């Protein structure tokens, strides 16, 4: 290479280096002056990001390892209602057959807006299909009961009854950290082997004293409202459903049920709270 060409090469090299330094410096200044577009930033995150849905679905730390055990006097017993101390106007809403897409979430919004806590009795197969909804139910402070895995009405031997209840109990704990000894037999059937097994395991078999009759395929939502408001008594356990089918009528009736009971002077409690209301 000629000396003249070598000099020109060196000059161009220095200019290129200077340009690169200037460009990097300018880029850094621009980055500090203008936040990175959020869309592009999300494509290559610097660290793992938890989506808002995931964060919401996780139960808060102080809700983990909840234990919905019943007082000794109610263990192995069948309950239809509880006589509260001094006939205080307390009432327990219970919701069966979920967790269920859409309907359960709509009910949660209504309960939250009205500062009402209830007891959900879960079907294991529905829980398996909707674990994130289940986590939200627990995170929002509601009580949980066992409603078997398949929601079968048929008679079954002890091994089958054990599997129906224990499998559901295990999944409730695995999914939400909740342990419960509240059990409700599907359809209210007490003689098909399920209730007998549950009682031997010291579950409280929780029935109901008042039904909204929201499984009636021909009834209007107002009928559900009337059923509950007319039949309400201190210590009543109210039956409703969020799963097992289309429950939009129950969702429609729910705000009126809550408003009407409040107007009558009732305070809403979960089943564990209701049991604590009972005289010692």
Image (cartoon, rainbow, N blue to C red):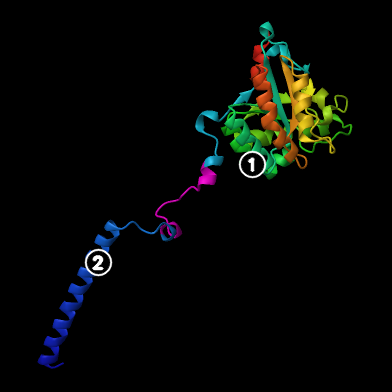
Q: CA distance from mark 1 to mark 2?
A: 48 Å
> Disc 1 designates what residue?
131
Instruction: Residue 57 in the image: state x and y as whole percent.
Output: 56, 41
Q: Quadrant of residue 63?
A: top right
Front residue of 227 and 273: 227
Front residue of 164 and 247: 247
Question: Residue 45 in magenta?
Answer: yes
Q: Quadrant of the C terminus?
A: top right
Instruction: Residue 243 in the image: state x and y as whole percent.
Output: 74, 38
Element class at badge 1: helix
Question: Residue 66 in magenta?
Answer: no
> Disc 2 designates what residue?
24
Instruction: Residue 199 in the image: state x and y as whole percent.
Output: 78, 20
Instruction: Residue 177 in the image: state x and y as whole percent.
Output: 60, 32
Tell me the crowding category of disc 2: few under 14, some 14 to 19, or many 20 or more residues within 10 angstroms, Cα based.
Answer: few
Question: In the displayed structure, does residue 151 sit left or right of residue 176?
Answer: right
Tell me the crowding category of disc 1: few under 14, some 14 to 19, or many 20 or more residues within 10 angstroms, Cα based.
Answer: some
Element class at badge 2: helix
Magenta-highlighted residues: 41-55
Q: Quadrant of the N terminus?
A: bottom left
* Residue at left offset 75%, top offset 28%: 225
Question: Does residue 78 lie above or below 249 as drawn?
Answer: above
If you read the primary sequence from the N terminus, does the residue marked by circle 1 or circle 2 appear first? 2
């Amino acid at each position: 290479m000629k000396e003249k060409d070598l000099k020109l090469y060196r000059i161009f090299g220095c200019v290129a280096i200077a340009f690169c330094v200037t460009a990097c410096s300018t880029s850094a200044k621009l980055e500090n002056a203008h936040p990175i577009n959020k869309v592009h930033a999300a494509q290559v995150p610097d660290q793992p990001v938890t989506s808002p849905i995931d964060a919401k679905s996780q139960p808060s730390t102080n809700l983990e390892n909840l234990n919905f055990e019943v007082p000794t006097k109610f263990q192995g017993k069948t309950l239809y209602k509880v006589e509260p101390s001094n006939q205080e106007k307390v009432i327990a809403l219970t919701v069966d057959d979920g967790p269920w897409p859409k309907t359960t979430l709509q009910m949660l919004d209504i309960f939250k807006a009205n500062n009402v806590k209830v007891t959900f009795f879960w079907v294991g197969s529905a829980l398996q299909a909707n674990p994130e909804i289940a986590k939200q139910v627990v995170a929002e402070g509601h009580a949980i009961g066992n409603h078997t895995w398949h929601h079968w009405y048929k008679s079954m031997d002890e091994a089958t009854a054990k599997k129906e209840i224990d499998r559901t109990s295990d999944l409730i704990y695995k999914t939400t950290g909740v342990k419960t000894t509240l059990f409700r037999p599907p359809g209210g059937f007490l003689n098909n082997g399920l209730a007998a097994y549950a009682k031997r395991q010291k579950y409280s078999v929780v029935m109901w004293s008042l039904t909204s009759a929201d499984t009636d395929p021909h009834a209007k939502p107002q009928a559900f409202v009337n059923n509950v408001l007319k039949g309400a008594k201190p210590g009543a356990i109210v039956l409703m459903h969020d799963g097992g089918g289309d429950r939009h009528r129950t969702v429609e009736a729910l705000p009126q049920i809550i408003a009407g009971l409040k107007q009558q002077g009732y305070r809403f409690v979960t089943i564990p709270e209701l049991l604590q209301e009972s005289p010692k």
